[in-house]
Each structure stands twice: as C-alpha cells, then as structure tokens.
Image: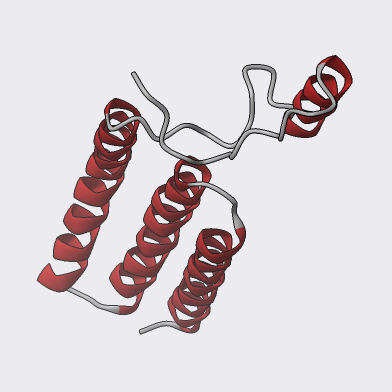
Amino acid sequence: MSALLAWLSSALLLLGGAIGLIGAIGVLRLPDSYTRMHAASKAGALGTAMILAGVAAASEGAFALAALFAMAILIATAPLAAHAVARAAHRAGITPLTGPLGDAPAEEEALAEADPRASPPEHGARGGM
C-alpha cells in the first residue's frame, strides 16, 4: 500500500470515529427523542460511511468493493429508518420539546403571563391524539 493511501485511510478512520463520537454525545445530551434520533441517524451513518471508506482505502481487492457496497447501502437506508422511527413516535403521541416556532422558553413565558397559576407544559411527554 502506498503512503498516500495509508494516510488517507488513517484520516478517514479518525474522522469517522470523531463523527461517531459527536453523534453519541448528541444522543446523550439532546433533550427529546426526535433530536436524539437525528443525531444518531445522521452522525452515525456519516461516521460509519467514513470508517468504511477508510477500510476500503486501506484494503485492496474484493474487500474494498464490499466495504464500498456496505457504505452505499448504509447511506441509502439510514434516512429511511430514521423517518420510520420518527413517524412511529409521532403516531404514538410523543411530542417534540419545542413549540411550532421552535421557541419553548418563550411559549412558557407567554403561558405564565396569560395565567400565572398555570404550570408550564411538560415537554417530551406523551400527548393525546
């Protein structure tokens, strides 16, 4: 293997691992199921695709073709799986953390100004449909 392919594969493997780590941190830190799923599906698919590209660059022969085929399948199916999970969560009545304008703290302040006795809504809780 040439030195250029060794450097390229090392860079792709490290970049894929870093993107996967950022996605894992996003799953732990984000507030509701929709944003967690977004972090897991986007960063997970991109990180894994980078790792598979690094494996394809490091290997020679038929294994490189198999890694590239796996990368194509992963990139094609990860958004579909995320959409299916989001749709199932929506149909189960799980509401997102933010309101329709994406501004949950302003929504709570408006509710408190309208009725000071009302408690703020529980975000991420199951709502009735």
Residue at coordinates 53% horizontally, 79% vertically from top-left?
A: 7
Question: Considering depth in this image, is 74 or 86 the residue closer to the camera?
Answer: 86
Question: Considering depth in this image, is 129 or 34 the residue closer to the camera?
Answer: 129
Q: Report the quarter where the C terminus lies.
A: top left
Q: Report the quarter where the N terminus lies.
A: bottom left
Position of 103 with respect to 35 (left or right) is: right
The x, y position of residue 30, in whole percent, is 59, 54
Position of 13 with respect to 31 (left or right) is: left
Q: Please, which residue is most extreme toward the left here?
A: 62
Residue at coordinates 32% horizontally, 74% vertically from top-left?
A: 55
Position of 3 with respect to 99 (left or right) is: left
Placement of 109 over or under 31, stated as above or below: above
Residue 83 location, quadrant: top left
The x, y position of residue 119, in whole percent, is 71, 35
Placement of 108 over or under 124, stated as above or below: above
Residue 76 location, quadrant: top left
Residue at coordinates 58% horizontally, 39% vertically from top-left?
A: 123
Question: Considering depth in this image, is 60 or 34 the residue closer to the camera?
Answer: 34
All told, the count of numbered labels is 0
Placement of 88 over or under 67, stated as above or below: above
Residue at coordinates 25% horizontally, 50% vertically from top-left?
A: 74
Question: Considering depth in this image, is 89 or 76 the residue closer to the camera?
Answer: 89
Q: Please, which residue is most extreme toward the front here?
A: 117
Residue 45 location, quadrant: bottom left
Placement of 61 over or under 122, stated as above or below: below
The x, y position of residue 50, in whole percent, is 42, 62
Q: Name the colouring of the figure.
A: secondary structure
